[in-house]
Amino acid sequence: MNSYQSGFLLTRQNKETSSNTLIDLWVKCDDHIAHLLVENEQAVAFILQERLFEYESLLKLENIPYLIKNTQLTNFQHQPIVGLYFSTTQQKRQVSQLLEQADLPIFESDIRLADRYLMERFICGGLNFVGSAIPKKGYTEYRNVKMKSALISPQFTKVSLDIECSEKGILYSVALHSDLDSRIIMIGEPEHSDLSIQWVDNEKALLLALEHWFQTFDPDIVIGWNVINFDFRLLIQRAKWHNLAFRVGRGNSTLYWRDSDKNRQQGFLSFPGRVVLDGIDALKTATYHFSSWSLESVAQELLNEGKSIHDPSDRMGEINRMYREDKQSLAKYNLQDCVLVTRIFELTHLIEFVIERTKLTGVELDRVGGSVAAFTNLYLPRLHRSGYIAPNLESENWIASPGGYVMNSKPGLYESVLVLDFKSLYPSIIRTFRIDPLGLIEGLKQEIGKEEEQAIEGFRGGRFHRKKHFLPALIESLWSARDEAKRNNEKAFSQAIKIIMNSFYGVLGSSGCRFFDHRLASSITMRGHEIMKTTRELIEGKGYEVIYGDTDSTFVTLGKAMSSKEADDIGQSLVSHINQWWTQHLISTYNIDSALEIEYETHYRTFLMPTIRGSETGSKKRYAGLIRKNGKEDIVFKGLETVRTDWTPLSQTFQKVLFDKVFHQQEVKEYVRTYVDDTKSGKLDDQLIYRKRLRRKLDDYQKNVPPHVKAARLADYHRQKMGKSPQYKYGGWIEYIITTSGPEPIEYLRSPIDYDHYVEKQLKPIADGILPFIGLDFTQLSASQLGLF
């Protein structure tokens, strides 16, 4: 055997053979690609020792080989556990189903063999391995493998891929953009071009050329936009139609597609040796938000650049036209999509983000979401070493826990409002009060008290051991790593840590997590309520009024306009007082050190807390405030119309300007009157467009059909009359205007615009949210304007 080598895990899967299950791992090393095959690793589940006779009596009736081994483990009810081992995962699945039907408990049977192998070795992406090397074409296979965790920072090669096709899914071209090689593979007669176009005779030749490209340039990561559920899904379908194996995976392997049981429009792609990252999924996982997830919209927002197409309203028709008449333009358009995706990934550091997430949690690089999997990866091996196995999912017995604390607001227009935020409140509660699944089980054995041998009291019967726990230490290490990442300006690393830390509460409160217990989640959220209420009392004890509180933020009015220096001094003084009080209180009451830390976040020079529409009650999660940073002023809108996608540009512009004038104590009467006048006279018609997403198929909307659905049906009706294929049959984004005949799509506008709708439904609600606080009434202002005609 050779000495240990280092690498980073690309893909993992289980491979069934007639006699055992192989763990199949592809690893990126500095100087080569390694294919690790782990043999003779048994699949394991756990059963109750006290009912062993019942298990064995049932299993002997089946012709499935198994092995039982004693363990030192118990379940959370402290019942002794034995291990049930199998040569293949298929055997484990069969037995699991058999035992479940017989109401015999079986634990951890859903943990995949490859996942268990890696997590029990604490492998989070990076690993050191040794094995018998077998040289292959383009990679090295290793047998008799041993491995252990390692800290590795890999350098991956990537390609951005995009396809163009007809509405029936017949391929026209495939573009590939990479540092390795960039080209467009296109069906057609060769033409001279400044672009790198590889001309092929037909669709089958295109697929074979794409297969050859992957085998030649061998990228580690494939990126794209909806690249899994559209591009690769269609490529696999077309390859199947041509009876092609489509060997684009490493080791000359084929792709495997599995449809989702929950959504027919989605599925799962297995791509041996290569990671596929969809731009939409990756951005969502990194907590980005966009009003539209189309490539055009995201590229415009992030890059100030979009796609080059002459007729966006009929994209499919334009693509068909270019394929028939102007293949050079289609090639350029195809490649531009790839370039835009590459630039979005680079700007947002998405690849660095998914790498850091894997290094922290061990989840696959291409895992979408995955907060429950991340928690399981980190927690399960530590739990086993403490003598416990994990419980099964119990979604039927799920008990909801209270949500975050949201205080009733005090509506008004204020000068000088401070915002004080608890830094990562829920993670700091977990750290401070030792909230942890193992800590709960061990704590329930103890009396509640202040001494080291006594438990810390939680809520709803929860109590937590002071020393036997893992989650507080995990959060503490992540917390320190994030502080260091911020100091080093490592944004992707810092963001990955923040998301993971904040996900721990969500996981513990989710019925989709095996460690869910309402005593855990409630001990976090109800402690948060207690902390926020007490903090409010501390602030009011200093003579200031709290006008709103939300989860971890407290809004404090100073009662009069103050300079930035005066406000900052008060904010820092309050922070010092609150943090010191909590430190002393937690030591004297619970004999624990506080990880709670409130920070002075913002000084709003002017601040609006609106009422709920049609009510005098203050709203929640909706406000606006004027801040000054680095010598510049800006208005922050939270939950109001200007940041919501279901309001028109007309209303958003009106709100921004109106609030700016009110916040700067400028005259607004003439502005409101003129804006209403301009709306009614047609001067602002280009701002009247509603844009909304169809989240289901058009035919699925039956009762209470909303305006955007009516507009989409009308659009498809007109398209069919013109001999075009329907555009909104399977969903999408629709743009429409409200007319005197109802909603009409902008590309087929036939009726006069209903200006009264826009005044009453778009302008009035915004004006009513702020004008009453300065003694004005929108209806009177707009009525007086009408009197001029």
Image (tube, grey):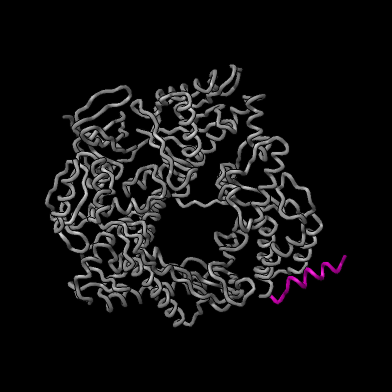
Give the residue at x 67% y 47%: 713
x, y percent for residue 166: 59, 31
Residue 530's x, y, as percent?
A: 38, 75
Q: Is residue 541 magenta?
A: no
Looking at the picture, how far across and down is residue 70, in whole percent?
11, 51
Whether 368 is drawn above or below 564: the answer is: above
Q: Quadrant of the C terminus?
A: bottom right
Residue in the foreground of this view, choosing between 111 and 298: 111
Which one is in front, 752 or 467? 752
Query: Is 780 part of what is drawn in magenta?
Result: yes
Q: In the image, 747: left or right of 700?
A: right
Query: Can I make out residue 488 in this image?
Result: no
Horizontally, residue 786 falls left or right of residue 50, namely right
Residue situated in front as seen by the camera: 384 or 22: 22
In the image, the segment drawn in magenta is 774-789
On the picture, is 159 further left or further right than 764?
A: left
Q: Position of residue 224 (x, y in %)?
A: 49, 37
Q: Magenta span: helix, strand or loop, mainly? A: helix
Residue 275: quarter of image: top left
